[in-house]
Amino acid sequence: MMKYIINISGLVFSLLLTASLISFPCLKSAHAQYHGYYPGQQIAEEKNKTTPIIPQIFSSQVSSVQQAKKIDVLYNTLYVSLWNYAMSDVNYQKKLYNLISSEHFQTTRYMAEFSETMNNAMVNLNENYKKLHKNIDAANREYLHIKETIRLADYDVLDKLWSEKIAEYEQRANNYFKMQHEFLNTYRALVAFIIKQGGGYYYDTSERSVKFFKFGAYEYFAKALDKLYKLTYEQKKLLKLHVPATEDLLLLE
């Protein structure tokens, strides 16, 4: 009987190889050894290193600069929330990927191995989705409150820009959550397939890979994994479109 081979670690490597082609900005900069003649200079330098620079999306467009900086902070906070939700998804994805790594196929797989993590990941997704839209509602209310401190002449520019940026944010956030939902549904279908296969696969200790007896089984398994890796990649790609000032790109590695 012909055997077909799929090496999950190989697939992971191909994904990481693709991701490695994306260049990340260096997060550390060289600093001079000389600290100046007065103590305050060193303190100011240390503060500048640790204080995140909030993009001046709104304050750069109006005359009420200082007041509008509060809107910059408000908008940045929305992306911080999205990234926090995404980091929880990243952690669940790592656990789920680990459960389908080749080594785990040394014994027969059972649904109980996957159920808790899959269910918790879905609960986490639904809760975060609700929180995100509550955050948007709260941000809109806070925007109106901040706007009261801004010159009337700046209202037209600010209102138009705020509407555009909030719509952009909401679309990106919704797209992100849709991809996470698709990831979890694809994973659940893959697990159901694995359980159904029963003795249709085994783990080859010499090659450290899962082997399938049927080509159709191998093909489905490989395509499902490819889809999962692609969804993970697209989610991270979307998050990189707007990196909040307080977040680190390295968290997506």
Image: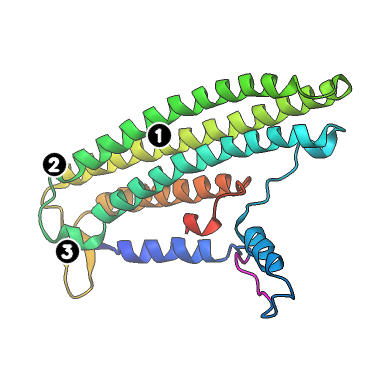
Instruction: Identify the residue at horizontal 65%, vertical 64% (top origin).
Output: 43
Callout 3: helix, strand or loop? strand
Residue 12 in which image quadrant? bottom left
Q: Crowding at label 1, few (<14), some or many (≥20) Cα neighbours within 10 Å?
A: some
**In the foreground, 4 or 176:** 176
Q: Crowding at label 2, few (<14), some or many (≥20) Cα neighbours within 10 Å?
A: few
Instruction: Identify the residue at horizontal 46%, vertical 63% (top origin).
Output: 16
- Under mark 1, the amino acid is His
Q: Is residue 47 left or right of residue 9?
A: right
| Mark 1 lies on residue | 181
Horizontal and vertical percent position of residue 173: 54, 34
Q: Earlier in the sequence, mark 1 or mark 3?
A: 1
| Mark 3 lies on residue | 203
Instruction: Identify the residue at horizontal 75%, vertical 42% (top origin).
Output: 56
Q: Is residue 19 left or right of residue 35?
A: left
**Residue 112: numbered disc:** 2
Query: Residue 158, relative to residue 84: is it above or below?
Result: above
**Is residue 30 in sight in this rendering?**
yes
Q: Earlier in the sequence, mark 1 or mark 2?
A: 2
Q: Crowding at label 3, few (<14), some or many (≥20) Cα neighbours within 10 Å?
A: many
- Under mark 3, the amino acid is Tyr
Which residues, given as a range, are shown in magenta? 26-31
- Check the image and name the residue furthest to the bottom: 33
Horizontal and vertical percent position of residue 214: 22, 54
Callout 1: helix, strand or loop? helix
Callout 2: helix, strand or loop? helix
